[in-house]
Image (cartoon, rainbow, N blue to C red):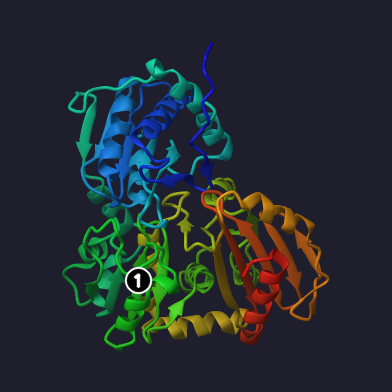
Amino acid sequence: MERMVENPVHFGTDGWRAIIADTFTFENVEACAQATAEHLAATYGTERPVVVGYDTRFLSDEFALTVARVMAGNGFRVQLANRPAPTPALSYRIIEAQACGGVVVTSSHNPYRWNGIKVKPHYGGSASPEFVAAIEERVPAILADRSRLKMAAANGGDIERFDPVPGYLKSLAGQVDIQRIKNAGLKVAVDPMYGAGAGLFGELLYGGKTTVTEIHADRNPAFPGIRAPEPIESNLGEFMLLMATGRYDIGIANDGDADRLGVVDEKGNYVDQLRTFALLVNYLLGERGLRGPVVKSVTTTNMAKLLADHYGVECFETPVGFKHIGPLMMEKDALIGGEESGGYGFRGHLPERDGILAGLYLLDYAAATGKPASVLLDRVFAITGPHYYERLDFDLEPGSNERVKAVLDAANPVEIAGRPVLRSDRTDGWRFFIDDGWLLFRLSGTEPLLRIYTEVTSSTLVKPVLEAGKAIAGVA
């Protein structure tokens, strides 16, 4: 009789993430890789290769080698990255190699103690909920019966090492006018946050009048000085001080696996993720004159809808995560998709987030107009009116998610910060609309964490709305 084993592998919004040496262990990674190999084989067969890559986190390269050995043991030819690389670079390689899919060892923006696995199907985007559920459900049986695990030798002939960066950078150069950016004489500051995007902007823009200065470009899995490699204001203090010197025209920051973007303007002010998405939408629709639908998650800006209306295109809304945004982008042939986390995807490239390409587009916007980020944002506000956003993150005690969920399920506020609640929805989390904007609650799918978001049209309303949100959720 097969013994029952509790499943340690749970895929959240984008991948399985867990604490290293606690749940993210070699045994559990092997089981997850075996389950993934079995599902890939059942879905696509084993004739096409599998791409495996990793970021700069602790032991990511060793975990990636373990995944590669399992894939090879299951009859796949494996292309294993020979260096840390952005997740979008590995997604691009899946398409370039006509692979059946890929696995990236990364915990994206999580704190240093975490690592994780992202699974990519043949189209290079985030795997659907159904795809990862099929992987998840295989894991307990594999852990219960280790004879099911198949592993090839690390130096076996079915594992080929490759450099994932050159082809990816060449593809980026085909998406944007690199020469225009080089000739613009921009002074660009970059913070890769010790992650996989280090050195790439410098390599792309080398040899022109534009200069690139990097900080935190070394590989340091401890991410010293920051809570986590997430390019949000609370983690970019040193970078914002650098920008406040006035020596740079624009600041670009990327998360640990470089699929997210953070922006700091020429005055040292953080440009939040919602405003950055609005800038990208206005760049593509307004500056470049392109046309196509816009896709946004529930947590991102209403400015995207207002800009889409202004330029006469459709705007679609999805739950959080590119596992929802990417497929809709492909279905609607959308021009751009974006989410509040700082992830933005683009037509003609990948149905997936790419923080490097998003940064290049903003550099091209500045190069084409000769205007700094603050002025470009004023152009957005001239169409949409000003919008103000903030997000609060609350670490919860382990096991508290269900308790908080019950509180929010029961919540039915009639007013928020003195404004009547007009309507609510449960598309993803708990969202309440007032005449000046919205308040949203979401529990993390990967951590004991509650996020409270708001976007309003008055700066003085941000704090009262968030305080009301804290009271509704019962958090301090």
Left or right side of 255 for 130: right
Q: Position of residue 239 (x, y in %)?
A: 32, 76
Residue 70 versus residue 445 in the image, above or below: above
Left or right side of 285 for 225: left
Does residue 97 appear in this view? no
- 129 or 350: nearer the viewer: 129
Q: Residue at x 22, y 23 (%)?
A: 153
Q: Position of residue 202 (x, y in %)?
A: 22, 66
**Total count of labels:** 1
Left or right side of 239 for 421: right
Q: Position of residue 424 (x, y in %)?
A: 77, 62
Can you tell which quarter of the image residue 196 is in? bottom left
Task: Report the residue marked by disc 1.
Answer: 252
Query: Which quadrant, please, contains the N terminus?
Result: top right
Q: Residue at x 30, y 64 (%)?
A: 192
Residue 313 versus residue 33 in the image, above or below: below
Number of other residues with Cα within 10 Å of mark 1, as a class: few under 14, some 14 to 19, many 20 or more: many
- 97 or 117: nearer the viewer: 117
Does residue 185 appear in this view? yes
Query: Which quadrant, please, contains the C terminus?
Result: bottom right
Left or right side of 330 for 116: left
Can you tell which quarter of the image residue 52 is in? top left
| Residue farthest to the top, as pictured | 1
> Quick one: SS at disc 1?
strand
Q: Position of residue 47 (x, y in %)?
A: 36, 22
Q: Residue at x 36, y 45 (%)?
A: 20
Q: Amino acid at mark 1?
A: Ile
Q: Residue at x 46, y 21 (%)?
A: 144
